[in-house]
Amino acid sequence: MTETGKDTTVVIVGGGVAGLALATFLLRRGIGCVVLEKHSRAYVERRQRAGALDAGGVRVLNEWGVGEAVEGHSHGNVSDADLPLLMDGEERRWRTGDADADEDEVEADGAFCPQQILVRNLIRIFLREGGDLRFGARDVSPHDIDTERPVVRYRDDNGSTRTLTCDFVAGADGYHGVSRTAVPEDVLTCSTHEFGYAWLSAMTAVPADPLAVLAVHARGFAAQITRGPDASRLYLQCPLTDTVEQWPDVRVWRELEARFGRSVPAKGPITSKQVVPLRGVVFSPMSHGRLYLLGDAAHLISPMSAQGMSLALHDADVLARAVSRQVEKNDTSLLDSYSETCLNHTWERQASAVWRTQVMHDAGDATYEGEFRKQIARKNLETMLEPPTAQHS
């Protein structure tokens, strides 16, 4: 059975932060869109992902009138100054204030908002305002993206093939999604940087207090970061060759305490573990024909930067404004420059992420990059920290 869906302006593939934000922004402008998400609503709302928004990400949500998506669920506004860094067990604080910084930037704060909370709230807002969100959309495939009327096909929960015609396709279905495959291989370029180490990532049923603690230690980088009122995620730097089986629960907690240089007051069940290689990836161009890539479908950034959600919101913001300009004024200039605009922003963030990642990891375990790089990284790290005596003054 084949059913022809109602035409819409934008078909958005993927119901994560990037796709839902774009859909909500478009809806606010009265522009029709359909979101296709392959998983169930229950799965999407439970899915645990990293959760931090920089000041720019919070500002984007506020500018589109959807600041409620983080209000009451973000543990209040936070900045680096609120988060301790442990250097070989000694608690240090990030340096605050920049004489050359813009006043708004100095006062602006980001927010800790677990990604599943942001996604859950965006779903609620989008559906509340009459949005068309279709869960369980399988075998999604964009076609005819080089024409004026692209087509997206998928199978619904009943196994029926459905077809949506539209003006634009937004590929927001993540790094492993299908949208990017619609771009010819001889058009798309993939640039990748491998850092040479991984994180053992462990999800725990234990709250984080404070919301995030980072540690630089001769045994390697470590962190505990909130994932909601009753959960936190642990990160431990490890070789790329490590496996989950090498990290039983007892070892995870013992190693976290060793790198923190102090006891961890609350220990509890570890519900999942994975070894995550640290890398940066950028696909270029971020558009082809009438297909536009955003979020993880277009780039991956080192988790050390905590920039993934903010990058996704930036892409959604730029694309929503571009589509709005075309629909309202028949002006394609912003759509034409979408890829260049977003890639420029992405490379700026990648540059910062690579520097921060290398500083935080090279300053710890010298077996990866050597003692010379360790000492250089420590000097660079000191420029970002208050003097050791400042905490006692």
Image (cartoon, rainbow, N blue to C red):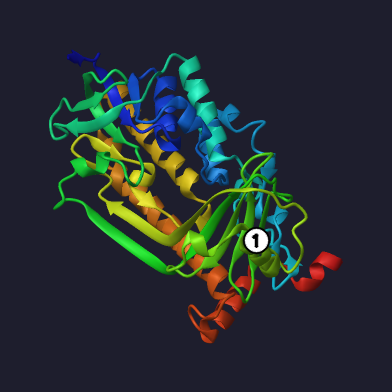
The image quadrant that residue 349 belongs to is bottom left
In the rendered image, residue 120, in percent from the top left (x then y), is placed at 53, 29
Residue 215: percent from left, percent from top: 65, 65
Quadrant of residue 21 within the rendered picture? top left
Q: Is residue 263 left or right of residue 55?
A: right
Measuring 70% from the left and 56% from the top, which residue is drawn there? Answer: 81
Position in image of residue 193 (x %, y %)? 36, 65
Q: Residue at x 65, y 61 (%)?
A: 250
Residue 356 visible somewhere in the drawing: no
User: In the rendered view of the protein, which quadrant contains the N terminus?
Assistant: top left
Residue at figure coordinates x 64%, y 40% from the top left: 228
Q: x, y (%) of residue 303? A: 49, 55
Q: Where 268 sits versus 157, above or below?
A: below
Callout 1: SS: helix
Image vertical order of residue 206 relative to residue 244, above or below: above
- Residue drawn 33% across the image and 55% down it: 282
- The residue identified by callout 1 is 250
Q: Tell me the kind of residue under disc 1.
A: Val
Q: Quadrant of the C terminus?
A: bottom right
